[in-house]
Amino acid sequence: MTTNNPMQIGVVGLGRMGENIVRRLMRDGHRCVVFDMNLDAIKTLEKEGATGSSSVADLVTKLSKPRALWVMVPSGDVTGKVIEEVASSMERGDMIIDGGNSYYRDDMARATSLSEKGIHLVDCGTSGGVWGIDRGYCLMIGGESKIVEHLEPIFSTIAPGIDSAPRTPGRKGKADTEEHGFLHCGSNGAGHFVKMVHNGIEYGMMAAFAEGFNILVNANAGKRKSESDAETAPMEQPQFYQFDIDTTAVAEVWRRGSVIESWLLDLTATALFNSPDLAGYAGRVSDSGEGRWTSLAAIEEGVPSPVLTTALYSRFASRDLDDFANKVLSAMRKGFGGHDEKKG
Amino acid sequence: MTTNNPMQIGVVGLGRMGENIVRRLMRDGHRCVVFDMNLDAIKTLEKEGATGSSSVADLVTKLSKPRALWVMVPSGDVTGKVIEEVASSMERGDMIIDGGNSYYRDDMARATSLSEKGIHLVDCGTSGGVWGIDRGYCLMIGGESKIVEHLEPIFSTIAPGIDSAPRTPGRKGKADTEEHGFLHCGSNGAGHFVKMVHNGIEYGMMAAFAEGFNILVNANAGKRKSESDAETAPMEQPQFYQFDIDTTAVAEVWRRGSVIESWLLDLTATALFNSPDLAGYAGRVSDSGEGRWTSLAAIEEGVPSPVLTTALYSRFASRDLDDFANKVLSAMRKGFGGHDEKKG
Amino acid sequence: MTTNNPMQIGVVGLGRMGENIVRRLMRDGHRCVVFDMNLDAIKTLEKEGATGSSSVADLVTKLSKPRALWVMVPSGDVTGKVIEEVASSMERGDMIIDGGNSYYRDDMARATSLSEKGIHLVDCGTSGGVWGIDRGYCLMIGGESKIVEHLEPIFSTIAPGIDSAPRTPGRKGKADTEEHGFLHCGSNGAGHFVKMVHNGIEYGMMAAFAEGFNILVNANAGKRKSESDAETAPMEQPQFYQFDIDTTAVAEVWRRGSVIESWLLDLTATALFNSPDLAGYAGRVSDSGEGRWTSLAAIEEGVPSPVLTTALYSRFASRDLDDFANKVLSAMRKGFGGHDEKKG
Amino acid sequence: MTTNNPMQIGVVGLGRMGENIVRRLMRDGHRCVVFDMNLDAIKTLEKEGATGSSSVADLVTKLSKPRALWVMVPSGDVTGKVIEEVASSMERGDMIIDGGNSYYRDDMARATSLSEKGIHLVDCGTSGGVWGIDRGYCLMIGGESKIVEHLEPIFSTIAPGIDSAPRTPGRKGKADTEEHGFLHCGSNGAGHFVKMVHNGIEYGMMAAFAEGFNILVNANAGKRKSESDAETAPMEQPQFYQFDIDTTAVAEVWRRGSVIESWLLDLTATALFNSPDLAGYAGRVSDSGEGRWTSLAAIEEGVPSPVLTTALYSRFASRDLDDFANKVLSAMRKGFGGHDEKKG
């Protein structure tokens, strides 16, 4: 499938996601001018048909007006600096798409600031991870309607397309853009707001699976010699916890026909197949902003999100950020009951 | 596709799931003898090729030995009574499959009790809901190996089959049964144990989506005139909550390419498409046992499952089971601060 | 007991807490000049020895330099406006104490702004509720050391004093100010930061009691006819839930010798004694900023506070702010299982 | 103060709590016959006026009928065995008080079993920790009314007494037993049921303090060089987290006049005074049964207790029982985003 409206677009940031977005765009007939601090990344894409550039400023000069430039830098900090640099070479009417993991508030501020120069910012939450080159990327877009419409050929190419999922029952006639996998969510910031909540949900779903598999792995807890003393409760009914569950097989069987079918389950099944005890992982789970921002939004809106926030906090705890809290608990127990801590 | 090993099987319980399981079995060449308290349900299936019966006892006499009989009664209470009734007509070597939502501990007890008569119980957690007739059902099975093997043609037909999901990367050669959508999880009870955890995860995933959509719906909270007085905090930064998000469109766009692709999301997209404000629902969310049992298991195993249990408690709270707790809070606030409750 | 260092101080805001702070100050020999929008409040205190004033500006003129003025307005919004008004009449070297429930960040900004005029802001988190006139108020103070020291006679009078609690074992010699019930916590904002966390803890403790009493009240759940069908799990072991617990008596007995002795328990005991079923309360629990801010701080610091945040969310849910989330859950259940909502 | 009704009572189990209960009884004029596996414990109390014994059977022979014997063994397992041993020497009409941390269900079963021999069991939840000798113990009692009344002189002595807390406003006239610190909560099991919920609340309160102090300790998080890359969100507003809070002083100041005054806070203040960084603790927090049972009860009753259960789960997580769950999360992140785990 080749698009009917090939466009030219600049792309700054050729990491895991950026380089695959360029490839997906070129496959579909768009012309890409690219830049990255890593020269090898530029060369690789030049061989595949992209136009390289020697700097952000050079890239901007190679674009025809009105210019469209996609910034695909993962970190929020660096994104801000790159957008400033890009904008300093641009002119009234040009367009910048922020495809990284920016905080939607930063996009709101940047859009206001850039609008003074007549430059248009579009924030585009981009989900799909390392698999997007084949699956396509789910795009959640914020910005001015005319600008978003102008860029539709780009979004349409990067998105997975209508065939990537069965049509929702009841939907008829011409498909809306969301059925192709991209959506204009609202004014500046709305795209990254929706992407933020998406990742918040992702944290919750991931935690649900993680906790569930942990319960399965411990279904044989009744077999272990239980420590029974004044400090630790012995297991009341060990006869009910005598199962050695093959979690790899369980992840696989759930992929077919169950209510919890999902891409996250597919990934878990793969990971467990490769290493049933996940021995290569230490279990220190990072968090990358959106989970925190989602909980901040819930609190500021005044709506409860105990599952999403608990999932976030479990990640904090996995990195021992509850250390002092736990010491306080042990100190209290010592204080009222004379309980010494048990050795691990 | 027709199975190479057609079997005869009795089915007691022809509700939403039972009748579709019978249809799926007959489509694949198995012969079904059926019974339900609802005579219409029997007649309907007779027209489609099943053999009806006038009672459980009558059904049992119509089966050839060793008999195989699937009990598909949703509620745990009734399941126990039906299994007892079935067993009272059966003989040594016969087999009963409990396909309902039984507590795995009940299956363990029943299996022990039935084994004294030489009757074999198999517990079979069955996921798929009202859609299973086409999607197939994910089957999580507990029981003696020989019995489970003997019944494999039945399980194989009811399960979705290998084509229902792309093969997990790395898996090669002959597919394991879990790749067909059914799994012998272990001894008696193991099937319903795994199904229990499955539903626990389902609760967590559902809550993650529910909370996320609630945050999206309230993304315009900054537009509402905020009540600001000593009792309620005013919104600090209303400028960040000015979005009117089309949640129906968001649910749809997330179905393509995003990390949170899942069947539960598909269902949510359908529900929101049919009614964007879900006006037909009061938001009193039932829970049907497995969620509770999963949390009980986590606690008894001594492993944390804060997300799954929080999801369960949110359902309790949706039914106002936190009523007295909330009154205690208001009473305390009155006690120390003289705060009267605000009107809703 | 009368202080050795009587001071003159202005107080703006004569609500529940403000008027009692004035009384406590006058009892101890300080001279108070007061103002409130409510003229009756001024008159009442004039009769008790305070000097009234006709406006904020008038109050300021009645103070000798360097002026010290306590602003005791509950709401954060209004506090900001009052402080601005006060400051507009003040001069270099004057001091304003913000004793309300301000967000510590607002105090940081105000302090910076006022410092340009040479006016000193002190933020003073004030706990004690309606009982402080007798118990004294716990004071958590942020600001410049010299200013806080200058105001010590005021803080010392308002605080409960050393005799209000038994000395912590191990503490010897001259008591630190914290043993008198007031503490200079750090630079501007530190006082309200500590007060914020105090209230966050308060939310968690209150929820712990509320949930516990709810479990006690439902200790007779096994006596109720259980609804048992496919939607709701019946109680497995009703024989263990046959107790009619007298929660009023339980709250009382816990006040003596138990590990959970606390002032919040004392208040609960009083409330339950007055109305064992708390029938006067609807159970819609307000939240007043600090609970939200505490959770925001935890998230931004990256430390888990699942209990404090869950307590906050329970308050949101008590006001039905989880409404749309619950509808999404019911809609999903309908989607996969055909479950209609049960009537409440 | 010496009781008007001195009684004779046997005590088996002379650990931290048992020996102090004996002392408290003897101080008030009761006669105690004691036994423990640790002969030194017996000798010590003999010197203080108790009658020693050489075995449980010997102890029983030394009691006059109807015998009253207090079993004070911490662990539930051992309690059961000791009660059986005691009962085997007893006769119709004798009374056993189970003062340990038994599961209330075990007491219900034991009471039924003992009643067949005419022996009466009383379950007595006992709170007060190592401090009870001076503070007295809060007693929550379950059993037959006549038996509980007969033993009232014992309970009255062990309990803290009416002067241990100010009278609840509104209470007038003769004090109920709960105002003395002991309460007949209901039939067999009711005492330990109430004690169970007491400890559940204790877990929640402890977690509230622990989380709050952790937030205070990290109030300087903005000073640390933040790691900012694609995996970890940098701190948005480090200027708001620049406080070095003296948590020892904060714990102390909160003891006077604040809403969160409590015995647990007193203990925390002591612990922090002795070691501000709590360096002697590893932060592996034990749980001893009641916290688990409280959450099990909440789930079985169908009432939400998210704070209490979350507090329990935090203890599990402090002992790394979330290990496999965290590995699953890291494996998923690797799967969809190519994220390698960060080093700790």
Image (cartoon, coloured by chain):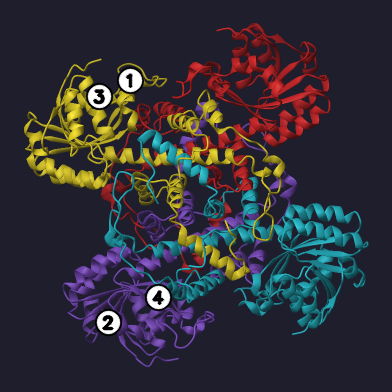
Chain colours: A cyan, B purple, C red, D yellow
Which residue occupies 88% across, 60% down? A87
Instruction: Report, in whole angstroms, how far the alpha carbon at label 2 lies from the one at label 1.
Output: 68 Å
Counting residues from the N terminus, which is met first, the one under dot 2 or under dot 4?
4
Q: Secondary structure at mark 2?
A: helix
Foreground disc of the pair 2, 3: 3
Q: Amino acid at mark 3?
A: Arg
The residue singled out by tag 3 in the image is D24
Instruction: Report, in whole angstroms, how far the alpha carbon at label 3 lies from the one at label 4.
Output: 62 Å
Most foreground residue, A32 or D62: D62
The residue singled out by tag 4 in the image is B139
Question: Which quarter of the rendered picture does the N terminus of chain A lie within?
Answer: bottom right
Q: Secondary structure at mark 3?
A: helix
Q: Seen from this angle, which residue lies furthest bottom?
A: B4
Instruction: Report, in whole angstroms, how far the alpha carbon at label 3 lies from the one at label 1.
Output: 16 Å
With B331 as the anchor, is D178 left or right in this view?
left
The residue singled out by tag 1 in the image is D162
The residue singled out by tag 2 in the image is B146
Say yes or no: labels 1 and 4 on the same chain: no
Which residue occupies 64% across, 78% down? A164
Q: Amino acid at mark 2?
A: Lys
Q: Secondary structure at mark 1?
A: helix
Say yes or no: labels 3 and 4 on the same chain: no
- Mark 3, residues whose alpha carbon is within 10 Å: few (<14), some, or many (≥20)? many
Q: Chain of mark 2?
A: B
Say yes or no: labels 3 and 1 on the same chain: yes
Q: Are marks 1 and 4 in contact (CB under 8 Å)?
A: no
Q: Residue B271: where, in percent of width, then height?
A: 58, 65
Is residue A1 at all visible to an observer of this figure?
A: yes
